[in-house]
Amino acid sequence: MSERVSAEVASDGAIEMVVEAAPQGLLRYTLDPDSVQQVWIETLVAHDDSVIGAATSPEQTAELLVRGSIECIAREIPSLVVGGVTMHPEMGPHRNAQIIAAGRATFIASEWEAVRRRTLPI
C-alpha cells in the first residue's frame, strides 16, 4: 500500500525589501507586507565588490543588489520565486544609499513561518 504525501503548494504573495547599497550592508525584508503584524527579517549581507564594480549605471547597481539579496533570501526560503519587482533609491538612516524594492512573490507558507518563528522573541 502506498502512502499519500501531501505536498504543500506555493501561494501567491508579495515581498518588500530594503537593501543598503554598500559593500557590506543590511538587508531587511518581509513576505507579509499587507499583514497587520508585519515581521521584518534583518541580515547583514556582503556584496561582491567585483560584481558591483562592473555595473555601468546606478540602475544596474540597484538591480544587482536586489537580485543578490533575493538569492540570499532564497537560501532560507527555497521555494521563493520573485517577479515584477519595482525599486527606487532612498537616503538611508546613516546618510547612505539604500534600495527599496517590492514585487510579486510565490513561496511555501511553512518556509516563511519557520523563518518568522526564528526571529520572534520567545
Image (tube, rainbow, N blue to C red):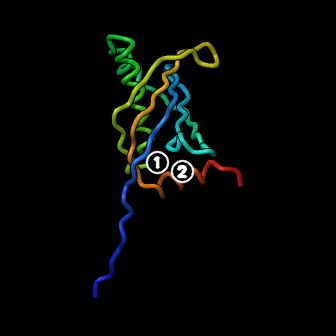
Q: Is 58 displayed left or right of 31 in the figure?
A: left
Measured as percent of width and height from the top left, residue 49 is found at 41, 20
Measured as percent of width and height from the top left, residue 83 is found at 34, 36
Helix, strand or loop under label 2:
helix
Check disc 1 and give the amino acid type. Answer: Glu
Task: Give neighbour class at mark 1: few <14, some 14-19, many 20+ (Cα, 10 Å).
Answer: few
Q: Which mark is residue 76?
A: 1
Task: Give neighbour class at mark 2: few <14, some 14-19, many 20+ (Cα, 10 Å).
Answer: some
Q: Earlier in the sequence, mark 1 or mark 2?
A: 1
Helix, strand or loop under label 1:
helix
Question: Relative to residue 2, is residue 82 depicted above or below?
Answer: above
Q: Residue 52 or 73: which is nearer the viewer?
A: 73
Farthest bottom residue? 1
Measured as percent of width and height from the top left, residue 22 is found at 51, 19
For image coordinates 59% across by 18% down, the residue present is 92
Q: Are marks 1 and 2 in contact (CB under 8 Å)?
A: yes
- CA distance separating discs 1 and 2: 7 Å
For image coordinates 44% across by 26% down, the residue present is 47
Which quadrant does the N terminus fall into? bottom left
Question: Relative to residue 109, is residue 63 depicted above or below?
Answer: above
Measured as percent of width and height from the top left, residue 120 is found at 65, 50
For image coordinates 53% across by 54% down, the residue present is 113
Check disc 2 and give the amino acid type. Answer: Val
Q: Residue 30 or 27: which is nearer the viewer?
A: 30
Q: Residue 8 or 25: which is nearer the viewer?
A: 8
For image coordinates 58% across by 37% down, the residue present is 42
Q: Residue 109 or 55: which is nearer the viewer?
A: 109
Which quadrant does the C terminus fall into? bottom right
Question: Where does label 2 land, which residue?
Answer: 115
Farthest left residue? 1
